[in-house]
Amino acid sequence: MKQVDLTRNQLVVAGKAWEHERSPCCRDMIRHLVRRECYCSWFQPSGGGLQDQFQAIRMGEGYYTLSLRIQKAMFRHVRLTKGFRNVERLPDGRLKLRIPTQLLVEKKRTATRFTVMRSKSGAPCGVGKPSYSKRVRLERKAEASDLIDLTDIINGILGPAAADSRPSYTAFFLSEAETAEHVVQHLFRECPTLTRDRMEFVRSMTRLYDKIVQN
């Protein structure tokens, strides 16, 4: 965190002052910043443009730039949905970035890793109610297909990260709990059949665990 030079940068949005004694950089203080954009102040360099804006947090009488880890906590709720534009208009008519540029790049990189192709499977159309044995076969086939989807998704999330030799902010700043949260969030998005029921989700995860252990 570096102190902002107020003589060279113009305050665009003043955020709430940090009221705790310990620095927000401390790992155990990050929880106080999760989804709390109110602490984020925005600056624009004198003579700079919209894309030059950067964020800071007020501590005492000064403003200090934010690390990527703090940015992730503050803007964790912001998703890169279809048509997302990283610009918003303030009540006074000025334009401001929606999220920090550095965080936008990281979110795009993470979203690319999470983009996986999900196979589509469905029961064949037929006349009348299928027999018991046929229903069992279809259910087992669906479970096997969902289990493969589940494995592919997890491999798609963790595989590229393990193989990527380039520096990764995610590898340095995400705890195991945060990594698990990301994985589960994308399982709910990609596997609605498995996650709509709590017991079915637990059974699916148990089967996946047994499969991985056996291999």
Image (cartoon, rainbow, N blue to C red):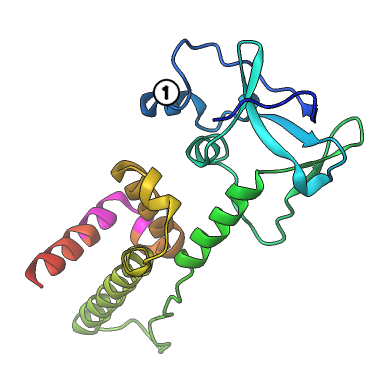
In percent of the image, x 43 and y 27: which residue is there?
31
Above or below, 137 against 24 in this view is: below
Q: Is residue 209 left or right of residue 91?
A: left
Secondary structure of the residue carrying tag 1 is helix
Question: As drawn, is 14 to the left or to the right of 18?
Answer: right
- If the image is split into quadrants, where does the N terminus sit? top right
Question: In terms of depth relative to the viewer, which is nearer, 208 or 155?
Answer: 155
Q: Amino acid at mark 1?
A: Met
In the depicted structure, whether residue 193 falls above or below residue 101: below
Please report the bounds of the magenta region as a residue range. 195-203
Give the residue displayed 66% in from the left and 43% down from the top. 99
Q: In the rendered image, which residue does mark 1 sit on? A: 29
Q: In terms of depth relative to the viewer, which is nearer, 149 or 12?
A: 12
User: Few, some or many C-alpha atoms within 10 Å of disc 1 (few <14, some 14-19, many ≥20)?
Assistant: some
Which residue is rendered at x = 30% and y = 83% of the image? 130
Q: Position of residue 32 (x, y in %)?
A: 47, 23
Asked if 43 appears above or below 153 in the picture, the reply is above
Q: Can you give x and y, in whole percent of width and height, for residue 106 in the image? A: 54, 54
Q: Main secondary structure of the magenta part?
A: helix
